[in-house]
Amino acid sequence: MVGVSYDDQASNAKFRDKYSFPFDLLSDAKGAVSVAFGVSKPNSDRSPRKSVLIGPDGKVAAVYEQVNPAEHPAQILGDLDVLTRHY
């Protein structure tokens, strides 16, 4: 599991540490990953705070439109646990 943000690596590390995320945040400074998953529009300077859960089959299993950083890791880890029980 990884997170992706437009922010640089140092900012992502501080954000990850602040909320004790049990995963890394990757820098997507040009927005290519965010655009590819439909989270951002091309040429936007910021990405909305959304999450995309990719299942073991490589398909989008869930899109989280509203994300609370303090609660979201537990939510997505719980959903991932349920999803992987079927594989």
Image (tube, rainbow, N blue to C red):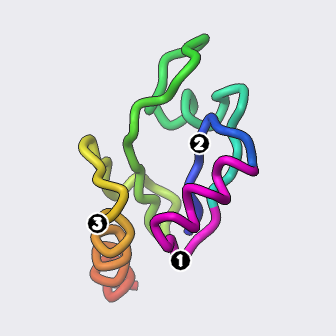
User: Label 1: which residue?
Assistant: 22
Instruction: Find disc 3 in the rendering and name its residue.
Output: 71
At 71% from the left and 32% from the top, the residue drawn is 29
Label 2, label 1: how many angstroms apart (C-alpha)?
A: 16 Å
The CA span between labels 2 and 3 is 17 Å
Residue at left 59%, top 48%? Answer: 4
Q: Is residue 71 left or right of residue 33?
A: left
User: Which quadrant of the figure has residue 82?
Assistant: bottom left
Q: Secondary structure at mark 2?
A: strand
Q: Residues within 10 Å of mark 3 (few under 14, many from 20)?
A: few
Element assignment for label 1:
loop
39 relative to 50, above or below? above
Question: What secondary structure is found at the residue carrying circle 3?
Answer: loop
Region of the chain picked out in magenta, as a range: 10-24
Gap in angstroms between the C-alphas marked 1 and 3: 12 Å
Our reading of the magenta stretch's main secondary structure is: helix
Is the C terminus in the top left, top right, bottom left or bottom right quadrant?
bottom left
Q: Amino acid at mark 2?
A: Ser
The type of residue carrying mark 3 is Glu
Q: Residue at x 39, y 39 (%)?
A: 49
The residue nearer to you, when weighing 45 against 54, is 45
Does residue 21 belong to the magenta stretch? yes
Q: Is residue 56 left or right of residue 73?
A: right
Mark 2 neighbour class, 10 Å CA radius: few under 14, some 14 to 19, many 20 or more: many
Q: Earlier in the sequence, mark 1 or mark 3?
A: 1
**87 in the magenta segment:** no
Rendered location of residue 63, percent (x, y): 31, 48
Is 10 left, or right, of 41 in this rendering?
right
Which residue position holds label 2? 5
